[in-house]
Amino acid sequence: MKPDLDPETDLSFTRTLAAPRQLIWECWTQPEHIPHFFIPAPHKVTAVDIDLRVGGRFNTTFEVEGNQMDNHGVYLEIVPGEKLVFTDGYSEGWKPAPEPFMTAILLLSDTPDGGTTYTAIARHRNPDSCKTHEEMGFIDGWGTVATQLEAYAQGLAG
């Protein structure tokens, strides 16, 4: 299920989350959950607009150090409960973005103890974009998001 990775353009990590896969899926696909984990604290998600279908929008607005950042994207692939692929390379209606940054691939599977194997992949259009994302702290940032997601999902389950 995991796609081939290109070390020049792809960043990836896998972690085991102590929360059920279906709950992790719901957190990623229902807009009311996204603000609770999607950007490392203390930054905030201030708006989410999801149309969960291939070609549907995945739009978020962040507040980072007092600045508003709009991120418009679309879903490219959806395998319920298992795989979610979205990109900022396009916005809804397949309108190309002038400065695309990456495509995200999230892979979820069950662990024997009822948790979730969580793989996050960031695929970039060129090695320079990949290097920039790595230097921005991909592992720390997306790792923090995974930690926040796990804690939030545990609170929902609990």
Image: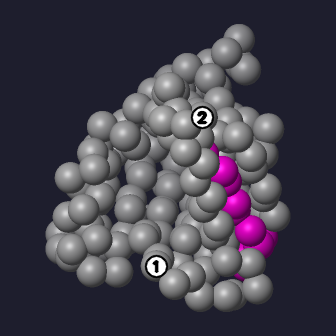
CA neighbours of label 1 inside 10 A, class few (<14), some (14 to 19), many (20+): few
Q: Quadrant of residue 126?
A: bottom left
* Residue 33, horizontal then vertical, whole percent: 73, 36
* Residue 17, horizontal then vertical, whole percent: 47, 30
> Which residue is labeled 1 in the image?
99
Residue pushed farthest front? 66
Amino acid type at circle 2 is Lys
Residue 25 in sight here: no
* Residue 129, horizontal then vertical, whole percent: 28, 71
- Work out whether residue 49 or residue 76 is closer to the camera in this orientation and state it: 49
Q: Residue at x 79, y 38 (%)?
A: 32
User: Start and end of the magenta stretch?
Assistant: 53-62
Residue pushed farthest top? 158
Q: Is residue 56 above or below residue 150?
A: below
- Decide whether residue 67 is among the magenta residues: no
Quadrant of the drawing holding the N terminus: bottom left
Locate residue 34 relative to residue 138 in the image: left or right.
right
Locate residue 81 relative to residue 126 in the image: left or right.
right
Q: Residue at x 37, y 40 (%)?
A: 141
> Which residue is labeled 2 in the image?
44
Marker count (numbered): 2
- Decide whether residue 58 is among the magenta residues: yes
Q: Please, which colouring scheme is shown?
A: one colour
Label 2, secondary structure: give it.
Answer: strand
Amino acid type at circle 1 is Glu
Locate residue 46 relative to residue 152 in the image: left or right.
right
